[in-house]
Amino acid sequence: MRSRYLDFLAENSRFLAFGFLMALCSSYGQTFFISVFSGEIRNEFGLSHGTFGLIYSAATLLSGLCMIWAGRQIDRIDLRSFSTAVCIGLVVASILTGWTTSVVMLGVAIFALRLSGQGLMSHTSMTAMARYFEQDRGKAISIANLGFPAGQALFPVIGVALAAAIGWRNTWFVLAFILAAVLMPLLLWLLRGHGERHTRMLVRTAETSAGKGLSQQVQWSARQVRRDPRFWLVAPGVLGLSFVGTGIVFHQVHLVEFKGWSLTWFAANYTSMAVATVITALIVGPMMDRISAMRMTPYFQVPALLSLFFLASADGLWVVPVYMVLYGLSIGMSRVVISALWAEWYGVRHLGAIRALVAAMMVMASAASPVLFGWMIDRGITMNTILFMSTGYTAISIVLIMISRRITGQSDGTAG
């Protein structure tokens, strides 16, 4: 397997590097990076934690809604042109962030960062890997996915160092320059010769639709997907990791106080989650190519189910690394399996629109959990109760996914 992995990496190195780099650059708009500058931003504009959180949540929700339209354009526009537009949008967003002079302008800047960075950069990376690889889809997604933990490890350190040296505003100007002068030309170079790859994909799609390729497959539209019961049965599981995980992270200070842990101990174990995510994604990718995403989907939440049960039922320090590792296993599996599932079920012709719909739903879920968890905490519901409720939610979503496997997907017409 190692030899096949290395051969695949060597044969497709440029396109895989494109997927990795797009995932890496999504860090510009990720919460873990923007939050590095939250203290300076709040002080500059005189914002409380709650007010800044409200602005951030509103901008995030709006970016999620815009993803439904913006993300589907990758189905209509050449990947090179689409990637260029996304990069330009992120450059403008970075300049706007450093230039912001009012609270309203700050909200617009955060919206632009979230849409072009966290939204469209991630969307482009995963859609391209799932669309242009069929037999080796799992390996491609798992390799490109390494850009996300790499960004999580590098960008906060770079941001803190630059902000200390030149200030937070100049840091965003420098980041805009690096993206425009270095990363964007590199991304376009990595896509050199993409026209031939796209032509081969179109031929393969036409053959599979006619039953001449590897499998007969109708190319579903996003509208048809929204009417497929399988999609809505799988959706709670797809959204669950983001919903529950974001709620826990957002209220981690309250969690550690309730459990009697130190925040330093809890935060230090995020490294365990990142390592587990990376290793799992690399292992699951080749497995999925042999087994199929559909057969693996019911199992990606099982480690998360166990992690939440342990976190809810025990208070020892050992619970923290166990929770982090198990939750990381589920994240690693989901990033590969779910990205490939849509291509397996619905084809790749309208994959951008389908993934954009899912991305918008995930953004909304991640914006809802901090509010819901906070509402329950304010009403005296303990963290253990909230965690047991999250465990129950996860168990139910696994059952729903198992039910979805018994349903045969049928579109209500030929997708155009």
Image: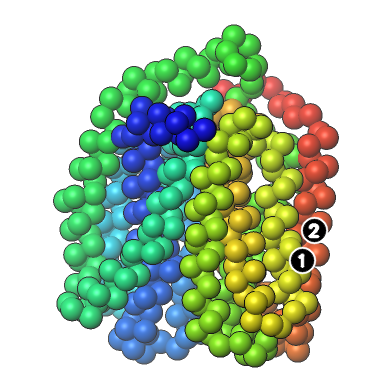
Q: Does 210 sit above or below residue 111?
A: above
The quadrant in which residue 17 appears is: top left
> Any mark on residue 414, and which?
none
Q: Could you tell me the amino acid type at mark 1?
A: Thr
The quadrant in which residue 112 appears is: bottom left
Q: Which residue is mark 1?
A: 391
- Disc 2 crowd rating (10 Å Cα; few below 14, some 14-19, many 20+) is some
Residue 217 screen position, x and y as percent: 64, 21
Q: Could you tell me the amino acid type at mark 2?
A: Ala
Q: Residue at x 23, y 54 (%)?
A: 179
Q: Is residue 103 visible?
A: no
Q: Nearer the viewer, residue 197 or 352?
A: 197
Residue 223 screen position, x and y as percent: 64, 36
- Tell me: 10 left or right of 186: right
- Disc 1 crowd rating (10 Å Cα; few below 14, some 14-19, many 20+) is many
Q: Nearer the viewer, residue 143 or 361?
A: 143
Q: Does 53 sit above or below residue 66?
A: below
Label 2 vs label 1: CA separation?
6 Å
Tags 2 and 1 in contact by the CB under 8 Å rule?
yes
